[in-house]
């Protein structure tokens, strides 16, 4: 039997159903603080590509390998080039070169105010840009329905009849 990949090990630990709600909240609280510290360091110098093996990055940020895997899983959608997170082991070379706008929007989408509210963003984007990115991300999840056709409105098929006597008859 093959050993589980690091990502599966991380997910087993992070979503352990045998833990109580309180234990899971403590786990995620600690993780979010670690995540915030790593992002603070990354955002201090956003144009420098951070590379290394999973183990080297875990050591660089003072974390265990599984916590680093969790971070890599979280940032992967914001990277310029995706890492092989499904198959990586601790010796896999990974990169943390991220797209700044995509990362900011993904933090908004995740409702991670403690991340998109970091002061480092002020050096990367001016206030107007941050507001624009925020609005764009929020609008991307909004579903807008078209105007409802009333019974007595002209039928949208172009027949010239009222909707209730045309296409609306079978509705």
Image: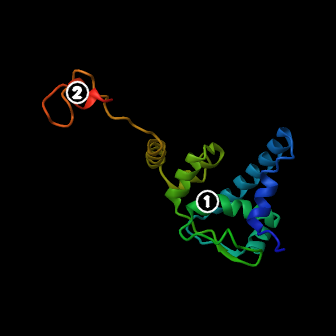
| Element under disc 2 | helix
Which quarter of the rendering shows the N terminus?
bottom right
* Relative side of 165 to 97, left or right: left
Viewer-side residue, 96 vs 37: 96
Task: Name the residue: 49% across, 57% down.
Answer: 101
User: Which residue is under mark 2?
Assistant: 163
| Circle 1 or circle 2, nearest the eye | 2
Q: Secondary structure at mark 1?
A: helix
Quarter of the image with the C terminus in it: top left
Q: Taking 127 as reference, is 10 above or below it?
A: below
Rendered location of residue 6, percent (x, y): 77, 67
Residue count near mark 1 (Cα–Cα under 10 Å), binned few <14, some 14–19, many ≥20 = some
3D distance between C-alphas at marks 1 and 2: 56 Å
Outermost residue on the top side: it is: 152
Above/below status of 151 relative to 2:
above
What residue is disc 1 on?
Answer: 43
Q: Residue at x 80, y 67 (%)?
A: 65
Q: Earlier in the sequence, mark 1 or mark 2?
A: 1
Residue 59 in the image, given as x and y percentages of width and height? 80, 70
Q: Position of residue 18 (x, y in %)?
A: 87, 47
Residue located 45% across and 39% down the image: 142
Task: Classify residue 16 as left or right of residue 32.
Answer: right
- Residue 29 position within the rendered picture, expressed as x and y whole percent measured from the top left: 78, 45
Q: How many marks?
A: 2
Foreground of the two, 39 or 75: 75
Residue at image position (81%, 44%) is: 24
Left-right relation of 133 to 82: left
| Residue situated in front as seen by the camera: 78 or 113 | 78
> Residue lying furthest left in this view?
160
The local crowd at label 2, few if under 14, some if 14 to 19, many if 20 or more residues have their Cα within 10 Å, is many
């Amino acid at each position: 039997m093959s050993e589980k990949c690091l990502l599966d090990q991380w997910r087993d630990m992070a979503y352990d159903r045998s833990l109580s709600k309180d234990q899971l909240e403590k786990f995620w609280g600690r993780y979010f603080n670690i995540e915030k510290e790593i992002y603070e360091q990354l955002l201090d110098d956003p144009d420098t590509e951070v590379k290394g093996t999973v183990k080297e990055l875990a050591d660089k940020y003072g974390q265990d390998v599984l916590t680093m895997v969790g971070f890599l899983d979280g940032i992967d959608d914001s990277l310029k080039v995706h890492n092989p997170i499904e198959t990586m082991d601790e010796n896999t070379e990974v990169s943390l070169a991220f797209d700044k706008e995509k990362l900011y929007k993904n933090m908004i989408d995740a409702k991670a105010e403690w991340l998109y509210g970091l002061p480092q963003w002020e050096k990367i984007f001016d206030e107007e840009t941050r507001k624009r990115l925020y609005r764009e991300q929020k609008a991307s999840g909004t579903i807008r329905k078209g105007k409802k056709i009333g019974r007595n409105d002209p039928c949208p098929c172009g027949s010239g009849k009222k909707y209730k006597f045309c296409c609306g008859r079978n509705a």
